[in-house]
Image (cartoon, rainbow, N blue to C red):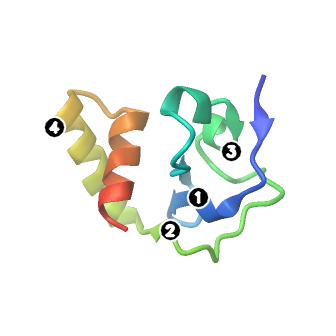
Amino acid sequence: MIYECTDCKHCADFDFGFRVFCLHPDLPSDEVCKYHPVGHQNAENCKGFDEDEPHRFGWKELDNAERYSQDRYGDVSYEGMREWCEDNL
């Protein structure tokens, strides 16, 4: 089951919601992925998504985050992407 997140202050997104990552300090990645829009990777259908929240990254930064994850973990993983976001706030 996918639960709807209602707390945008922990939301990091690339290119106005195209890719979304939750940075909530108390939720591990395997739990965060159960929440919408994280579980669906984008905020296109998220009623509460606020693209004016402070954790916004651009399209070029998405490439950097994917490259970081690939180099560090051998794959573009949620954990790697989330780690890049946290390191680049």
Badge 2 crowding class, 10 Å Cα cut-off, few under 14, some 14 to 19, many 20 or more, is: many
In the rendered view, tell whether residue 59 sits above or below residue 71: below
Badge 3 crowding class, 10 Å Cα cut-off, few under 14, some 14 to 19, many 20 or more, is: many
Total marks placed = 4
Tell which tag, 3 or 2, sits nearer the viewer. 2
- For the C terminus, the image quarter is bottom left
Tell which tag, 3 or 1, sits nearer the viewer. 1
User: For mark 2, what is the residue?
Assistant: 55
In the rendered view, tell whether residue 51 sits above or below residue 6: below
Q: Position of residue 69 (x, y in %)?
A: 26, 40
Q: Amino acid at mark 2?
A: His
**Seen in the image, is 27 located left or right of residue 71?**
right
Q: Position of residue 49 (x, y in %)?
A: 73, 61
Q: CA distance from mark 3 to mark 4?
A: 26 Å
Secondary structure at numbered mark 2: loop
Pointer 1 and pointer 4: residues touching (CB < 8 Å)?
no
Tell which tag, 4 or 2, sits nearer the viewer. 2
Which residue extends farthest left? 71
Dot 2 or dot 1, earlier in sequence: 1
Q: CA distance from mark 2 to mark 1?
A: 8 Å
Viewer-nearest residue: 13 or 89: 89
Dot 1 or dot 4, earlier in sequence: 1
Whether residue 17 is visible: no
Q: Amino acid at mark 3?
A: Pro
User: For mark 4, what is the residue?
Assistant: 71
User: For mark 1, what is the residue?
Assistant: 10
Dot 3 or dot 4, earlier in sequence: 3
Task: Give residue 88's quadrant in the image.
Answer: bottom left
Secondary structure at numbered mark 3: loop
Q: CA distance from mark 3 to mark 2?
A: 15 Å
Dot 3 or dot 1, earlier in sequence: 1
